Amino acid sequence: MRSWPQVDIPAVDSKYALPTLTLRDTRSGTKQALPVKNLYRMYVCGITPYDATHLGHAATYLTFDLINRYLRATGAQVRFVQNITDIDDPLLERAARDGLDWQELAHSQIELFRGDMVNLHILPPESYIGAVEAIPLVTEAIINLRDKETIYSVESDLYFRVRSDSEFGTRSHYSQAEMQKIFAERGGDPDRIGKKDVLDCLVWLAARPGEPSWPSPFGAGRPGWHIECSAIALKYLQPDPTDDFAIDIQGGGSDLIFPHHEMGAAQVAVITDKPYARTYVHTGMVGLDGEKMSKSKGNLVFVSKLVAAGVDPMVIRLALLSAPYGRDRMWSDEILNSAATLMIRLRSALSRNEVAPTKETIALLIASMADNLNTVRAINVLERWIEATESGQVGGSGGELSRAIDTFLGIAI
C-alpha cells in the first residue's frame, strides 16, 4: 500500500550530544534506555479506516514520530512499519450502516489519513501494509503456528492457544477477570462455545454469507485482527536472528495493550521462540471537555475538520505536545487557543534578526526529548527562550533553533 511523501529532517550539529533515548516500557512499568544500535525496528498499529483521523489517532502517531525523529537524529536507521486494518467487522458494519461499498469507504478514509499525516508533518513508515495485501503472510503465520500445535478449530474458524506462550499476560498485567472483560469489550469472544480457553483468539474467520472472503489453505475466509499485525511485523521488520528480541519497539494507543498487543506478542513469541518487543510504548487516550472521546458519544474531533476550519496543523501538533504522551488527557478550545498564541510568539521570536542565546536552549530541548519524550519540559524550555528574546537578549541563532525544533518536535516553523 502507498504511504505518504517523505519528510526531511534537518541535521543536528555535531556539537550537541544526544543522550540515549529512554522510554516508559509498559511491560516493566519503568523507564528504560534503548540500547545504542545502528538499526531499530519499530512497529506501530495503524487505523481501521472507517473514521479517520481523530485527535486520539493524531496523538498516537505523533508520539511515534517523535521516537522516529530522535533515533534518526542519532544517525541510526529506523525500520518503521505500520499496518492498516482494511478489512474488519467495524469497517463492514459502518459501510452497511451508511449504504457504502466497504472498499470505497476504506479507500476514502485511507486517503484522508494520508493527508492528515502530511499536514501534521509526520514521517511516513518505510512499509505501510494493508491487511488484505498481507493475507498470504497471515496464512503463512497460521501454518507456522499450526505446525507448533497451537492452532485448533471451532466449527470452521481457527483459534490460537494464547497460553502456549508461557509469558502470556505479563505485558499487560491484568487479572483473569479483567482480561475477560476487556477482551469482550474489544472484539473478543470469551463466551464462544468450543474454545479451549476463553481468551484464545481468532486467527482465521471462515467465510460468512454476504461478507468478503479470500481463499486459503484453511478454506475461504479472512484474517483475525491480532495475527494480521504479527505477520506483517515479522515480514517487513525482518528480525535480526542474533538479537534477543524480535523487534525493538511495539507501539500504539493504551487501548491496544490488551488484547491486541498481548495476543500479537504471544503469537510472535511462539513463531520466533524469542520475546517480541524490547520495549512496549503506549499513548494515553484523548477526551473532549471532560468526557471520553468516542464514536458512540459523537464527540470525536477530527484533524481534517480542524484544518478545513483554518487551524494551522502545526498548532494542532503543538497543542498535542503540551501534555505527557502516556497520560490520558482532555482536549479543549482553550488548549488549542493557547497553542496558537504560543506559536505566534515562537514564530515572531525566531523571525528577529537578534535572538537570545540558543545553544543551551537546544541542548535542553534535546535532553528533554531523550527523557521519555518530555514534551512538556521541552515546551517550557522554548517559552523561557521566547521570554528572553522578547526581553532583548541577543547572541543566539534563530535558524539553528528553528531547525532543532523541526528535528526533535516536528514543528515546521
Image (cartoon, rainbow, N blue to C red):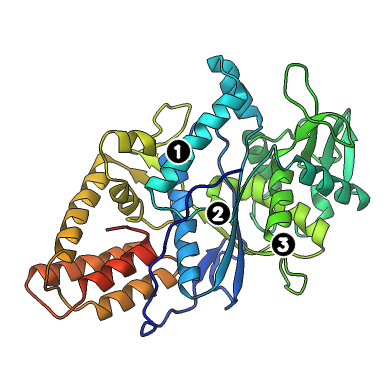
The disc at residue 96 is: none
Task: Evaluate if marks 2 and 3 touch, with contact meaning CB atoms under 8 Å apart.
Answer: no
Residue where numbered disc 2 is placed: 125
Location of residue 45 with respect to 404 vertically, above or below: above
The part of the image, by quadrant, that contains residue 32 is bottom right
Tell me residue 222's x, y (percent).
Answer: 76, 32
Residue under the image location 46 percent in, 35 percent down: 112
Location of residue 24 with respect to 44 vertically, above or below: below
Residue where numbered disc 3 is placed: 238
Going from N to C along the chain, the mark reached first, 1 or 2, is 1
Amino acid at the residue labelled 3: Gln
Quarter of the image where the N terminus is located? top right
Residue that protrudes farthest toward the bottom in the picture:
15
Residue under the image location 30 percent in, 75 percent down: 362
Tell me residue 327's x, y (percent).
Answer: 43, 54
Residue under the image location 88 percent in, 29 percent down: 156
The part of the image, by quadrant, that contains residue 184 is top right
Task: Evaluate if marks 3 and 1 touch, with contact meaning CB atoms under 8 Å apart.
Answer: no
Q: Does residue 392 appear to the left or right of 302 in the view shown? A: left
Q: Does residue 209 appear to the left or right of 92 in the view shown? A: right
Quarter of the image where the C terminus is located? bottom left
Location of residue 177 with respect to 26 vertically, above or below: above
